[in-house]
């Protein structure tokens, strides 16, 4: 038995993003900024042009190919063209001077180059995380192991190739896979196979050159055609990102020190154990491969956010199969963001396994479960499944994995009217019932997790009856000083942030909004703008008068002095002796 190979030529797969390119003459002359550009003294420009020709090898140009030895007249022609475009000038001393526009062009190219370099590094890092887990005995779509692989094989072939590279001076010949590595199937065989290749190289320095020499490496072969081994190098090299897709003339491929460092990080760590169902279930296997990428791509959370996410995940595990798990908090506490993070964790980052819907005052059963919609041909109506029915049917068809329905603003709608008969069957999963419009028989999937966000100060939240309340498990999401500090730590100067945090902490219990209201503050002036445009309306009645409950917080806001004169006039009127104030507490719907 041996590693499976392709009997046809592998396509040339290259995952790396091509490097930035630029017009050679433009880049060269702009890069010569501050140097001489006059007759018999164009050497600085020619040096820059040689660099451009070498750097931008993929750049195609009309006419003749760029040439650093072109005539002085031709260089002056290019210079004149760029001058007329406003990219550069040549001063009275004969020195090239890039204009602001010209410098912006060069800076833009440098920014793109740096961005592409970072993107390629990210592709290499994430791709290596996935390839590190690939199994030789991976299940096919029917759940069967790959053909020609013995039962119980635990070898990770990509990882085996990487290990061979690192232990064999970062060089690997296609015959090393063809005659040795490609015939290993278990992890305990790998060290012996690599030692065998090392001994062959030591005893037969020219052994790869002859058939007689290759027989000492190994009698058995996977193929006589090196192109059939190329797919294994492509997989191990992530399509040329880590290892060249093409071999050198001697048949070897080499691993660079930079890429070796990426592999060493993975080879030094134990690979997580394969879940039992991943050996026979293709979806579970793919989830196993993707889990390190999902963890790496998941946004970092502040300590307060981490605590809430962990609490929600615990609630999902305990109550998710029979209740709606609701994140409950006033506006601006990050409920939706946290709910999406939880959904991402539950579904292993698979967007096909989650759906969202936002409730509002007029949301109905027909919007949520199923309802009639106009036919596209204008001839009457047709019944269509809506959000709940769509995601539920997906979950019923895939019982081995969890699915998520995220309901935003759960308490905005009339829960009884929207949920209908589902109110009972969300609690009693697996019990069949009949949908009221289509009369189809169905059930709520046990693996469908329903997560909701709600504002406990909504009037509709206050009016929820016991039938709804006992089917909702609430997780409080409070305003957080810690989250505010973490959120703005890199945006605002420390002294500014300290003032804002002190004010927020002092009035935390009274404010009708959470820390997230300041999320987009990048500088001090933004705080005043956010306060005027977002915060102040939440603290005021429809006539613009600050509610009594919020007067103290309003007057203590540390950045009031940066408000516009108009706002100051209004505030002074509101605070003046004998001025009218709102004589009632804020309306729940307004503060929502």
Image: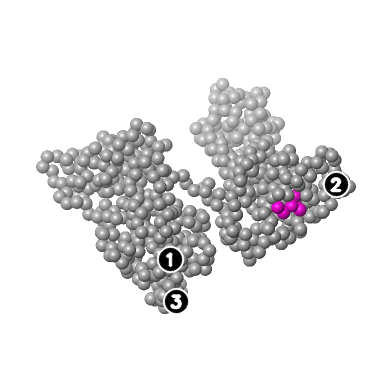
Q: Name the residue under label 3.
A: 441
Decide: is 178 above or below 31. Answer: below
Q: Is mark 3 on a helix, strand or loop?
A: strand
Q: State the image coordinates of residue 236 (x, y, percent, origin top left).
A: 68, 48
Of label 3 and label 1, which has the lower sequence position?
A: 1
State the image coordinates of residue 365 (x, y, percent, origin top left): 36, 69
Q: Give the quadrant of the N terminus.
A: bottom right
Q: How crowded is mark 2: few (under 14 residues within 10 Å), some or many (20 or more)?
A: some
Q: In which quarter of the image is residue 287?
A: bottom right
Q: Provide the residue span drawn in magenta.
A: 181-186
- Examine the rendering and report whether any part of residue 286 can be seen: no
> Which is in the foreground here, disc 3 or disc 1?
3
Q: Residue at x 39, y 67 (%)?
A: 427
In space, the residues marked 3 and 2 are separated at their CA atoms by: 68 Å
Query: Is residue 481 among what the camera can see?
Result: yes
The local crowd at label 3, few if under 14, some if 14 to 19, many if 20 or more residues have their Cα within 10 Å, is few
Name the image quarter holding residue 301.
top left
| Image depth: mark 2 or mark 1 in front | 2
Reading the image, the residue beneath label 1 is 387
Depth check: give the residue in front, 197 or 458.
197
Q: In this view, does 185 lie to the left or right of 322?
A: right
Few, some or many residues within 10 Å of mark 1 (<14, 14–19, 20+): some
* Residue at x-position 35% and y-position 35%: 497
Q: Residue at x 70, y 60 (%)?
A: 151
Instruction: Provide residue 395's location: percent of width, then percent of height.
Output: 49, 66
Q: Which of marks 2 and 1 is nearer the N terminus?
A: 2
């Amino acid at each position: 038995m041996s590693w499976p190979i392709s009997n046809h030529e592998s396509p040339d797969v290259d995952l790396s993003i091509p490097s930035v390119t630029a017009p050679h003459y433009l880049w060269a002359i702009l890069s010569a900024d501050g140097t001489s550009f006059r007759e018999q003294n164009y050497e600085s420009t020619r040096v820059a042009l040689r660099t451009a020709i070498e750097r931008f090898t993929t750049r195609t140009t009309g006419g003749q190919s760029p040439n650093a030895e072109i005539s002085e007249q031709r260089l002056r022609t290019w210079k004149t063209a760029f001058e007329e475009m406003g990219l550069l000038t040549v001063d009275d001393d004969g020195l090239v001077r890039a204009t602001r526009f010209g410098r912006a062009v060069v800076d833009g190219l440098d920014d793109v180059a740096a961005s592409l370099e970072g993107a390629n590094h990210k592709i290499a890092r994430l791709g290596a995380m996935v390839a590190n887990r690939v199994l030789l005995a991976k299940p096919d779509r029917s759940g069967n192991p790959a053909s020609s692989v013995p039962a119980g094989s635990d070898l990770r072939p990509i990882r085996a190739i990487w290990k061979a590279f690192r232990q064999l001076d970062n060089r690997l010949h296609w015959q090393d896979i063809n005659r040795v590595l490609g015939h290993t199937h278990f992890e305990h065989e790998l060290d012996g196979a690599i030692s065998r290749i090392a001994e062959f190289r030591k005893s037969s320095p020219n052994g790869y050159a002859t058939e007689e020499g290759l027989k000492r490496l190994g009698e058995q072969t996977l193929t006589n055609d090196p192109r059939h081994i190329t797919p294994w190098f492509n997989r191990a090299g992530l399509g040329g990102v880590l290892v060249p897709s093409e071999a050198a003339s001697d048949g070897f491929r080499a691993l660079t020190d930079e890429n070796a460092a990426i592999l060493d990080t993975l080879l030094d760590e134990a690979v997580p154990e394969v879940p039992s169902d991943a050996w026979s279930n293709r979806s579970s296997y793919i989830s196993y491969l993707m889990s390190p990428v999902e963890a790496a791509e998941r946004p970092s959370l502040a300590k307060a956010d981490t605590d809430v996410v962990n609490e929600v995940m615990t609630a999902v595990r305990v109550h998710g199969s029979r209740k709606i798990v609701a994140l409950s908090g006033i506006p601006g506490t990050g409920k939706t963001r946290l709910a999406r993070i939880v959904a991402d964790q539950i579904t292993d980052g698979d967007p096909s396994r989650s759906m969202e819907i936002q409730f509002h005052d007029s949301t109905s059963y027909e919007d949520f479960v199923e309802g009639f919609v106009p036919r596209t041909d204008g001839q009457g109506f047709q019944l269509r499944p809506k959000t709940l029915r769509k995601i539920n049917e997906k979950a019923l068809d895939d019982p081995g994995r969890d699915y998520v329905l995220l309901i935003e603003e759960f308490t905005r709608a009339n829960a009884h009217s929207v949920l209908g008969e589902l109110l009972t069957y969300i609690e009693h999963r697996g019990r069949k019932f009949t949908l009221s419009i289509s009369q189809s028989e169905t059930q709520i999937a046990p693996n469908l997790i329903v997560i909701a966000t709600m504002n406990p100060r909504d009037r509709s939240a206050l009016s929820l009856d016991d039938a709804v309340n006992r089917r909702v498990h609430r997780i409080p999401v409070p305003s957080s000083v810690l989250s505010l500090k973490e959120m703005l730590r890199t945006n605002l100067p420390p002294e500014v942030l300290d003032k804002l945090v002190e004010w927020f902490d002092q009035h935390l219990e009274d404010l009708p909004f959470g820390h997230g209201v300041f999320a987009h503050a990048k500088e001090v002036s933004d705080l005043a703008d956010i306060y005027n445009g977002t915060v102040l309306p939440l603290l005021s009645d429809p006539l613009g008068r600050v509610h009594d409950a919020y007067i103290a917080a309003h007057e203590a806001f540390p950045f009031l002095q940066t408000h516009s004169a108009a706002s100051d006039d209004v505030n002074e009127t509101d605070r003046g002796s004998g001025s009218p104030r709102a004589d009632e507490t804020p309306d729940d719907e307004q503060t929502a």
